[in-house]
Amino acid sequence: MTATTDRLFEGADWDFQTLQRIHDACEEIARSELGLDTYPNQIEVITAEQMLDAYSSVGMPLFYKHWSFGKHFAHQEASYRKGLMGLAYEIVINSSPCISYLMEENTATMQTLVIAHAAFGHNHFFKNNYLFKQWTDAEGILDYLDFAKNYVAQCEERHGRLAVEQTLDAAHALMSHGIDRYPGKKKLDLRAEEKRAGDRRLHEEGAFNDLWRTVPTGPIKSPELLNTERRRNLLGLPQENLLYFLEKTAPRLQPWQREVLRIVRHIAQYFYPQSQTKVMNEGTATYVHYRIMTRLHEQGQISDGNFLEFLQSHTNVVFQPEFDDQRFSGFNPYALGFAMMQDIERIVSSPDDEDREWFPDIAGTGDVMAVLRDIWANYRDESFISQFLSPRLMRHLRLFHLHDDPAESAGVLVDAIHDERGYRRVRRELARQYDVGYIDANIEVVDVDLAGDRRLMLRHSVVKGAQLNEADAKRVLQHLADLWSYDVSLVEVDPTDTIEKEYVVSPRELAAAAA
């Protein structure tokens, strides 16, 4: 055993010199043994109140003000003070440098765990996964958030807090439908977005006005202009990015409102990869922190007591309640991700015949980290689960699939058990739960009645009978109508194009519209 003088710390206490030693020790293992490639790290220690504040503003270090953030802060602070909820040990920001916020209440062991988990596990995943490369700008996000915060504050001074809040309320309601789901030719450059903001607004205001001045409103209408195909092409329809469509074509929005929509849209796009990689991202970070902490213990840099403290926390993080447990609320992404990473390590290093049959490309290749780094870079949750969930892990997790369709049977059926066909069915159905094309509502703007009342027409393609919640749909459509300034209709259609439900909402008179 290495002498205690070689240990990174003793007991629970730490100081900033200790954190530096911990970071350096974790970095040595991450780079030399695991081959991780990370952004530069920036580690900041914050209080519980600051952590709650970060919670309320979706974890961002710089953010514009909005009443909902204060509401979330008050609710979560009350729950925390009453002991009804705990706080995360850390928050990590996908930026360059990669910012990791550590709770000052953490023990030295927990700070080591957090640095290994966030500053190296998450950091490597952010920098190397293809979705983050396509959709995020780690170099420019902090500057853009600073620009957004200042811009919204300036709008409140010039146009009034109420008008800005109403615009933000509507934009936030549409945030999940304000993203591009398929990569374009040009990578997002947030620093350039900030620099071009002024010129772009002036140009688009002029172009937008020219478009709407050509729209006939009287009895004489040009057949050429009203041609359906020409109209849809002119407006870029169909369009699934509702915020983008409103930003470009809403008739009565002020230039500052269009910029606010653009800000919310860019921030929504920033979070888009995280929603598709929750299992992989947390699984990667958990696997990395487990490898680093184990290696530090083997090297004698942390004591047996510190390692047991880590194992207790780690075990809590990867705990997965059984399906009939009252605590069950779906799959714990930490548990599923970590279990799959460990299972891949087993397949690569010591496979059995079943593994060789199911995973011929990786079974027995020997280089665990090379395989894992390739997976971390080139998959998202849906494709990761559909290709790498093994029969052995399915047996270990006791996975099965229930089928409940009143149109096909009178009750709940178990239609996938532990045989080859059942394994493939279970894997396919579990992967589908993480497929954004399956779980996110497919809503598009399909047309605008330019010749009549300028009604905005949307279409929701219903998948497997999953219609929108009526109350939520009406509330969100109200925000959409307020931004559009004319009536909005939405039809829900099944795969045979049969209309199952239709909504029509009229706009309200808002302070933002008159500003």
Image (cartoon, rainbow, N blue to C red):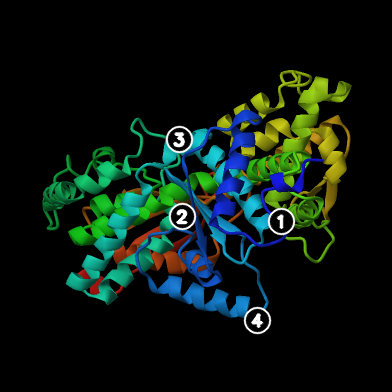
In which image quadrant can residue 287 be found? top right
Left or right, residue 34 beside residue 54: right
How far apart are the alpha carbons under marks 4 and 3?
A: 41 Å
Q: Mark 3: which amino acid?
A: Lys
Q: Secondary structure at mark 4?
A: loop
Q: Is residue 286 above or below residue 346?
A: below
Mark-to-mark CA distance, 3 and 2? 20 Å
Q: Distance from label 4 to label 1 (Cα)?
A: 32 Å
Mark linked to residue 176: 2
Q: Which residue is mark 4?
A: 82
Asked whether 511 or 12 is in front, the reply is 12
Q: Earlier in the sequence, mark 2 or mark 1?
A: 1
Element carrying mark 3: helix
Is there any visible trace of residue 251 in the rendered image? Answer: yes
The answer to which of marks 3 and 1 sits earlier in the sequence is 1
Mark 4 vs mark 1: which is more N-terminal?
1
**Residue linked to disc 3:** 133
* Depth check, front residue: 7 or 246: 7
Residue drawn 76% across and 23% down? 359
Q: Nearer the viewer, residue 3 or 268?
A: 3
Classify 10 Å Cα crowding around label 3: few (below 14), some (14-19), many (20 and above). some
Q: Amino acid at mark 4?
A: Lys
Q: Nearer the viewer, mark 2 or mark 4?
A: 4
Q: Quadrant of residue 234?
A: top left
Q: Which residue is mark 1?
A: 10
Q: Secondary structure at mark 2?
A: helix
Q: Is residue 411 above or below residue 486?
A: above
| Residue 263, placed above or below residue 431 | below
Which residue is pictured at 78% across the width and 39% down the height? 298
| Quarter location, residue 467 | bottom right
Residue 316 x/y as whole percent: 76, 57
